[in-house]
Amino acid sequence: MGFGVGDYPIWKYIIMPFISGLVGYITNVVALWMTFGPLEFWGIPLFRIPNEPWGIIGWQGIIPTKAEKMAGICFDLMTTRLFRMKEIFQRLDPKRFAIEMEDGLLLVLDKVISEVAMEYMPKVWQSLPEDVKTDVVITTDSETSNFLTQFMKDMQEHVDDVIDIKDMTVDACVKNKRLVVKIFKECGDKEFIFIRQSGFY
């Protein structure tokens, strides 16, 4: 018969806060883990609502599940409130672009011309002497500066028609969910530590 309240010994009351803290800590840890993982759906996909983390039997982390939606929202906010893609391309100097790209293009020009020629006129290209082939490459190279300059000008005017930046961004985030999760973890590292530890409080 020890000291206590009612029929319970006092040590049971002493350990109650610690047990409650441990349960709270474990609950918070599990909740955070379920927020970020698993990256792909884990379980038996008998039935699952699109873009929802849960299934009848299984779970996918909330952040990985919402990667496509979050990437789309972030892109829309950035391109409507912070900047526009067309404005970014307008800042590029077409002539400077041509100068920077010219050397790199020269390295692949020979291969590109050869592949195109072999596809559309293989017999003619194969019958040409090497000197003539070299002249074709040199002549083409002499026009690359004008081509690249005009190419960039056209891109600046029609970038929204040529490239779907949003689709590329969203697709990259969906394919690389691990990176999306890493961004969230690194941005909220201190806060997540507090959330885990707050289970003890």
Image: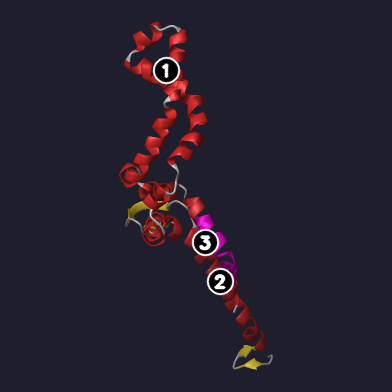
**Residue 195 appears in the figure:** yes
Residue drawn where x is 35% and y is 57% of the image: 51
Query: Which dot, 1 or 2, sits closer to the camera?
Result: 1
Mark 3 and mark 2 residues within 8 Å of each other at the beta carbon = no
The residue at which mark 2 appears reads as 195
Q: Amino acid at mark 1?
A: Ser
Identify the residue position indicated by label 1 in the image: 114
Vertical arrangement, residue 146 with respect to residue 135, above or below: below
Mark nearer the viewer, 3 or 2: 2
Q: Is label 3 in contact with label 1 (beta carbons under 8 Å)?
A: no
Location of the N terminus (image quadrant)? bottom right
Magenta stretch, residue numbers: 181-194
**As displayed, is residue 164 above or below residue 70?**
above
The residue lying toward the viewer, choosing from 143 and 134, is 143
The quadrant in which the C terminus is found is: bottom right
Are there few (<14), some (14-19), or many (20+) residues within 10 Å of tag 2? some
